[in-house]
């Protein structure tokens, strides 16, 4: 996947990444938002276009909610509400 | 020990009325006969599947919400497994009752293939 390229700096042994605002967990911020495997609309924003689960460092979820998201995505995949991979071609 | 369960099953999209009715009555009878308590039985209609299941691109979703013990869920799953009409099923044990009712109207992506509800002349 495309990583964000940090500008290469020759100074200093450690390359410092540009400052980023700390992402907040959407589910901690909004208590009304529920994680449910039956609701693919919420889950869609946590999978890539290829159907992979977006990691916590990108999505900004807290660990508790990321675990719940992961489980919900796996359940939804199982019951064909969201895709497992990008393209399922049928003959 | 009575637990809360929910089951989603995907059945073949091209079943007749009687077959669908027979399926739901069989499920109701089973739950009734094994001391379960059926809370809701919903037909979500025919939807497009996110990927083909048993070579079928569409499927009719059924949602069951019931209380029962382990024997009931084992028997229900055994029967669903044996039923050719059922493409897939998934049972989930619920920790707590969902406060919000099931988000049933989850963007019916595929146009429901001719709902035969208003088929009165």
Image: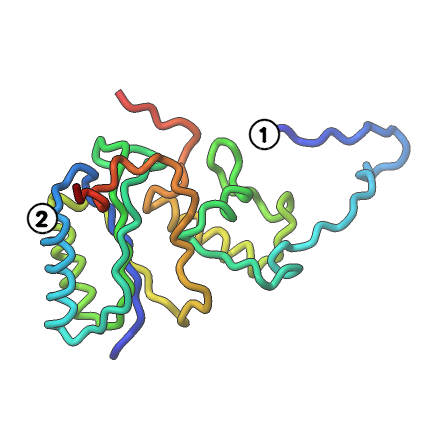
Q: Nearer the viewer, residue B108 or B78?
A: B108
Residue B90 seen in the figure = no
- Left or right of A68: which side holds A13? right
For label 2, the SS is helix
- Above or below, B27 relative to A57: below
Q: CA distance from mark 1 to mark 2?
A: 50 Å
Give the label, 1 or 2, closer to the camera.
2
Picture quarter with the C terminus of chain B: top left
Q: Residues within 10 Å of mark 2 (few under 14, many from 20)?
A: few
**Mark 2 falls within which chain?**
B
Look at 40% across and 71% down and name the residue there: B97
For label 1, the SS is loop
x%, y% of residue B117? 22, 46
x%, y% of residue A39? 44, 50
- Left or right of B70: which side holds A37? right
- Are discs 1 and 2 located on one and the same chain? no
Using the image, tell me which numbered label, if any, was put on residue B18: 2
Q: Which residue is mark 1?
A: A1
Q: Give the farthest residue toward the front.
A: B121
**Mark 1 falls within which chain?**
A
- Above or below, B74 relative to A61: below
Rendering colour mode = rainbow
Q: Nearer the viewer, residue B16 or A89?
A: B16
- Above or below, A49 relative to A73: above
Picture quarter with the N terminus of chain B: bottom left
Look at 28% across and 45% down and name the residue there: B45
Look at 35% across and 35% down and name the residue there: B110
Using the image, tell me which numbered label, if any, was put on residue B107: none
């Amino acid at each position: 996947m495309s990583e964000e390229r940090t500008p290469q700096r020759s100074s200093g042994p450690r390359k410092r990444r540009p400052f980023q605002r700390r992402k907040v967990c959407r589910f901690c911020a909004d208590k009304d938002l529920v994680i449910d495997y039956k609701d693919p609309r919420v889950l869609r924003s946590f999978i890539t276009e290829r159907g992979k689960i977006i990691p916590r460092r990108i999505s900004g979820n807290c660990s508790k909610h990321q675990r719940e998201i992961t489980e919900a995505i796996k359940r939804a995949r199982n019951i064909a509400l969201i895709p497992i991979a990008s393209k399922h071609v049928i003959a | 020990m009575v637990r809360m369960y929910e089951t989603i099953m995907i059945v073949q999209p091209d079943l007749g009325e009687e077959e669908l009715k027979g399926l739901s009555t069989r499920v109701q009878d089973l739950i009734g006969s094994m001391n379960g308590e059926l809370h809701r039985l919903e037909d979500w209609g025919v939807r497009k599947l996110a990927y083909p299941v048993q070579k079928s691109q569409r499927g009719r979703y059924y949602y069951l919400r019931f209380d029962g013990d382990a024997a009931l869920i084992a028997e229900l799953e055994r029967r669903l497994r044996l039923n050719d009409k059922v493409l897939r099923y998934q049972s989930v044990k619920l920790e707590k009752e969902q406060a919000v009712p099931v988000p049933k109207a989850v963007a019916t992506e595929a146009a429901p293939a001719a709902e035969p509800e208003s088929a009165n002349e």
